[in-house]
Image (tube, rainbow, N blue to C red):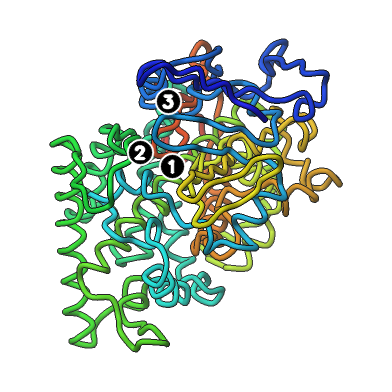
């Protein structure tokens, strides 16, 4: 791929990403994949047209990461973006994705440019740390998410799902419900129940949840100073609101962490994720997380464990609402798989349809749309020499919808994973949780949570779209809907209907 850098100054940077004929594979002809879309095809943001200046690109990026990108990234294997300060390379070639994530992950650490916006909240959490510090953190965190631990926290997930059904019951009258906020509520409830053994109704939990939403609205990732070639020691500027909300959240997490530390010392701490993480020593150094380190890690559980799960669940419910044949299949599966008043971890193995739906929802709407790495040494990608310090971008959003990898990439089809194309791409072009050494430690947790909550909700309610309220995907921290996702809920289970009538 080639890029025309026609800049004559700071404001005239050519940010068009122009593929060569070899990369196009269709005689250089690129087209809008939205044109002539099937009526049931899920919504997709419009791509930006043509060339823009660096300042214009930043404004587009701040508004929405996805629509700031050109359309041909859905077809190109690699793209180069040039600015006066650095080079970025988006890699959609599965071989390059394999190299960066699985074969040589330590040569591609997390980019400092993306760390800038997240540090006020996340500090030096495992999500943005690198090198020895990251290795130390993973040695402590990983044991908390091993298979046996998932079975232990499953009842807490179940309780969150049951509470969500009860909370939604008064709203199930056929009137529009903004389902993203409800998905956020139940996902945060799961985090607090599994991490600290308290429901979201807990006063500190509720305050943290409310403040976290305010923090998101400040769009901390869209930080202009991240574009400048500043040394790491140079102080970064964040908005007052970003600093305030981050400090409030960290203070609330600190209260929970200190209380748990006291329970651990007294021998009265529950056997949940927080206790496991706080009492697990690094097998190499023998040290445990101190309070500040634990605050960093809990903060990323809020972001990666709550926000991403909420986004995926909301999109999955929308997709089922617009594809009733799949919704009916999930409902029938759930109605025949759950034992009344009993909680069995083995129930998860009886929900393959729900799992496939949730997996397909994360293909179309990956919660984290882009991963940004930095080349630590000289590289040669395809026909490009990559200098140290260059950004290497892996985009689940584009990879999951790539026209040269997936059959009908913009269609919703949970059954695709039973096809040869779908099975092949699961290992080479499907990375909602990243992959390799830096794969999300809670990926199995998230899949279990999403599958269970989706089944519980669809078992209880029928979800229908609201005419004229099709959601528009936008991405800041995660892929959300610009104006929310509005659905109509009606009770599905006769027992649920009776409870509603009695209420």
Q: Residue at x 68, y 25 (%)?
A: 19
Frontmost residue, 501 versus 316: 316
Q: CA distance from mark 2 to mark 1?
A: 6 Å
Mark 2 neighbour density, 10 Å: few (under 14) some (14–19) many (20 or more)? few
| The quarter of the displayed image where residue 386 is located | top right
Please give left or right for residue 487 compared with residue 30 in the image: left
Q: For the N terminus, which image quadrant?
A: top right
Q: Residue at x 53, y 42 (%)?
A: 393
Frontmost residue, 214 versus 12: 12
Q: Is residue 277 above or below residue 486?
A: below
Q: Which residue is mark 2?
A: 503
Q: Residue at x 37, y 24 (%)?
A: 58
Q: Is residue 206 above or below residue 285?
A: above
User: Is disc 2 in contact with disc 1, using a CB cutoff of under 8 Å?
Assistant: yes
- Mark number for residue 448? none
Disc 2, SS:
loop
Q: Is residue 265 above or below residue 66?
A: below
Coordinates of residue 223 in the picture (x, y in percent): 30, 35
**Residue 335 in view here:** no
Q: Which residue is mark 3?
A: 64
| The quarter of the displayed image where residue 398 is located | top right
Frontmost residue, 420 versus 306: 420
Q: Earlier in the sequence, mark 2 or mark 3?
A: 3
Please give left or right for residue 42 compared with residue 312 in the image: right
Q: Which residue is mark 1?
A: 499
Q: Earlier in the sequence, mark 1 or mark 3?
A: 3
Disc 1, SS:
helix
| The quarter of the displayed image where residue 45 is located | top right
The tally of labels here is 3
Coordinates of residue 229 in the picture (x, y in percent): 33, 40
User: Is disc 2 in contact with disc 3, using a CB cutoff of under 8 Å?
Assistant: no
Coordinates of residue 44 in the picture (x, y in percent): 58, 23
């Amino acid at each position: 791929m080639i890029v025309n850098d026609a800049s004559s100054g700071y404001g005239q940077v050519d940010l068009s990403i122009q593929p060569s004929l070899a990369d196009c594979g269709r005689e250089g002809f690129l087209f809008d994949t939205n044109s002539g879309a099937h009526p049931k095809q899920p919504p997709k943001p419009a791509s930006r047209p043509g060339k823009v200046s660096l300042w214009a690109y930043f404004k587009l990026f701040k508004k929405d990461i996805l629509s700031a990108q050109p359309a041909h990234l859905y077809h190109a294997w690699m793209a180069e973006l040039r600015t006066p300060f650095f080079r970025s390379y988006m890699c959609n070639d599965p071989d390059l994705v394999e190299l960066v994530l699985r074969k040589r992950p330590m040569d591609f650490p997390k980019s400092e440019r993306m760390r800038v916006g997240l540090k006020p909240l996340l500090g030096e959490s495992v999500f943005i740390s690198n090198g020895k510090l990251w290795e130390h953190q993973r040695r402590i965190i990983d044991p908390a998410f091993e298979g046996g631990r998932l079975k232990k926290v499953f009842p807490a997930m179940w309780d969150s799902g049951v509470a969500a059904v009860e909370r939604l019951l008064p709203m199930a009258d056929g009137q529009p419900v903004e389902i993203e906020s409800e998905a956020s509520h139940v996902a945060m409830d799961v985090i607090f129940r599994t991490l600290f053994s308290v429901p979201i109704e807990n006063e500190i939990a509720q305050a943290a949840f409310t403040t976290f939403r305010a923090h998101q609205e400040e769009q901390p990732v869209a930080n202009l100073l991240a574009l400048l070639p500043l040394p790491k020691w140079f102080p970064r500027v964040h908005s007052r609101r970003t600093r305030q909300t981050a400090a409030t959240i960290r203070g609330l997490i600190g209260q929970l962490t200190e209380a748990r530390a006291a329970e651990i010392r007294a021998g009265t701490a529950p056997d949940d994720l927080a206790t496991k993480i706080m009492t697990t020593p690094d097998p190499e150094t023998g040290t445990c997380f101190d309070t500040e380190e634990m605050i960093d890690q809990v903060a990323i559980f809020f972001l990666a464990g709550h926000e991403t799960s909420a986004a995926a669940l909301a999109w999955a419910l929308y997709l089922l609402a617009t594809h009733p044949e799949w919704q009916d299949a999930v409902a029938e599966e759930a109605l025949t798989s759950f034992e009344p008043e009993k909680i069995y971890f083995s129930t998860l193995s009886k929900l393959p349809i729900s799992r496939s739906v949730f997996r397909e929802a994360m293909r179309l709407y990956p919660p984290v749309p882009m991963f940004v790495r930095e080349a630590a040494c000289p590289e040669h990608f395809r026909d490009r020499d990559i200098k140290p310090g260059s950004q290497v971008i892996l985009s689940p959003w584009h990879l999951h919808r790539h026209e040269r990898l997936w059959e009908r990439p913009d269609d919703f089809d949970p059954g695709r994973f039973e096809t040869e194309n779908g099975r092949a791409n699961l290992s080479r072009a499907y990375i909602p949780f990243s992959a390799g050494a830096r794969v999300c430690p809670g990926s199995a947790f998230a899949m279990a949570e999403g599958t269970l909550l989706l089944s519980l909700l669809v078992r209880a309610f029928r979800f229908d779209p609201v005419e004229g309220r099709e959601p528009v995907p936008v991405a800041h921290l995660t892929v959300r809907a610009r104006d929310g996702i509005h659905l109509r809920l009606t009770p599905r289970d006769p027992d649920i209907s009776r409870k509603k009538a009695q209420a």
